[in-house]
Amino acid sequence: MFTTDMTSTHPRKPPSDTTALNDCIAACLACEQACTACADACLAETLVHELRACIRINQDCADICSTTGRSLSRLTAPDLELIKTQVELLLLACVKCGLECEKHASMHAHCRVCAAACERCAQACRRFLGLPVR
Amino acid sequence: MFTTDMTSTHPRKPPSDTTALNDCIAACLACEQACTACADACLAETLVHELRACIRINQDCADICSTTGRSLSRLTAPDLELIKTQVELLLLACVKCGLECEKHASMHAHCRVCAAACERCAQACRRFLGLPVR
Amino acid sequence: MFTTDMTSTHPRKPPSDTTALNDCIAACLACEQACTACADACLAETLVHELRACIRINQDCADICSTTGRSLSRLTAPDLELIKTQVELLLLACVKCGLECEKHASMHAHCRVCAAACERCAQACRRFLGLPVR
Amino acid sequence: MFTTDMTSTHPRKPPSDTTALNDCIAACLACEQACTACADACLAETLVHELRACIRINQDCADICSTTGRSLSRLTAPDLELIKTQVELLLLACVKCGLECEKHASMHAHCRVCAAACERCAQACRRFLGLPVR
């Protein structure tokens, strides 16, 4: 990842803590990939019809991760209210997606890994937002 | 657009008013395209350095439109709280992006068109959310 | 859609035929939406395990539509070779996705609609590329 | 990143070398982030009007990275011809974007970092495609 170098060479300084920002961007990318792969792995399972809700929220969470990772990567003329609302949406998506994945974690290892990616991303969102990290 | 046909042939019924849903999906797609094109048109202007904030929020708004349009196109196992929060984020983005574009509307016709796309999308979001439409 | 107005108000002129460009952008957006909805509709079907290949290529085609629609919406400093290669990829994706959807068109109306969206987008790609339109 | 764990827990085996696949996915994500940030960093520069071509290709390359990373993360019912064509497009985009960024590398450190991300991604594409790696 080149995130740290990209942030440090940008002509604008981040409006928030740089470490929390870089960590949140990296968590977005990792969670987007895990959710995309988990949706596809669920689709390949024999009992795919029991995994519809997991596939659905995986796809939504992946898209929200992608949009948030891009927005956080931009430091020019930021709208702080919009960014905060975006990260709050991602936190909600990660919590919900993680809970759904955990339901299937004992059965499907990919759901266990994806739940971990969601949890890590949720924590990064909390840190970025200045919320208590559990 | 095939939105109406796709929604009517989906095995699941929409959790909300079908017309409002289809209209919101179409508005998302149209606004994403307008914002992507407006960011690029601003970049080509001689006074691009005065349009940085417009380019930035155009890009964010385009990404949020894309994610929302995809989420609304999915009717399987919806999480209504997540969808509502997503559309509220889009409403915020469209209002802010539209206000920024209107600042330059007298100078740049593409900003005027983009402001109209944002306004239409904001209205579609309000209708989807059951908020008063102005 | 605001595509025609956005293109006509852009400070740069399109490097290709304007009608073919606008039509291809509109077809990308419509096909992205149809493919996203068709993947989700297939997921909701009782016989979802027979629709895995359809869901998979629907998702890939939707992503390629999105990327191509964005690229075509940008007129600043175009790289014509890259754009041509992008549209050729989309043509391939639409042909393949359309063929897969047609396999299920008699059984699932959403696959029939999606096949039509893919066919329209493939035709728009051919016109953009200057290939014979069937 | 959870890429390695997601791939190894997927019920389908990759159609290609697993290490090359995982490496290419990771390179896509890193390059998408670098290109998104570089476009935005260029936008913030005083001489932004000299960086239009760089911003443009950064944006296209970021979108192609995103689409390719998603496609490679899916292992269900792959269409090998479509995947190969997608990775070839990405290779072209990374080479072109890297060359453009290198033009500004002595002036702008973010362009230097982004050129390195493009080069790493191009190498990962070549390895995935079985082409000679320079």
Image: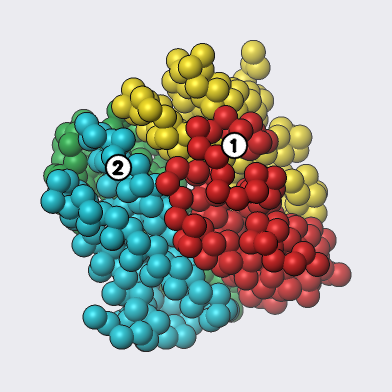
Chain colours: A red, B cyan, C green, D yellow
Place of residue D124 in the rendered image (x, y in percent of width and height, measured from the top left): 65, 28
**Which residue is rendered at x = 78% and y = 75% of the image?**
A103
Q: Nearer the viewer, residue A39 or A73?
A: A73
Furthest-right residue in view?
A: A106
- According to the picture, the residue beneath numbered tag 2 turns out to be B51
- According to the picture, the residue beneath numbered tag 1 turns out to be A7
CA gap between label 1 and label 2 equals 22 Å
Query: Which structural element holds mark 2?
Result: loop
Q: Chain of mark 1?
A: A
Q: Is residue D39 visible?
A: no
**Which residue is rendered at x = 54% and y = 62% of the image?**
A84
Instruction: Identify the amino acid type marked 2.
Output: Leu
Q: Is residue A69 visible?
A: yes
Query: Which structural element holds mark 1?
Result: helix
Place of residue D1 in the rendered image (x, y in percent of width and height, measured from the top left): 74, 46
Checking the image for residue A91, the label placed there is none
Place of residue C31 in the rendered image (x, y in percent of width and height, measured from the top left): 36, 57
Residue A87: quarter of image: bottom right
Q: Is residue D80 left or right of residue B74?
A: right
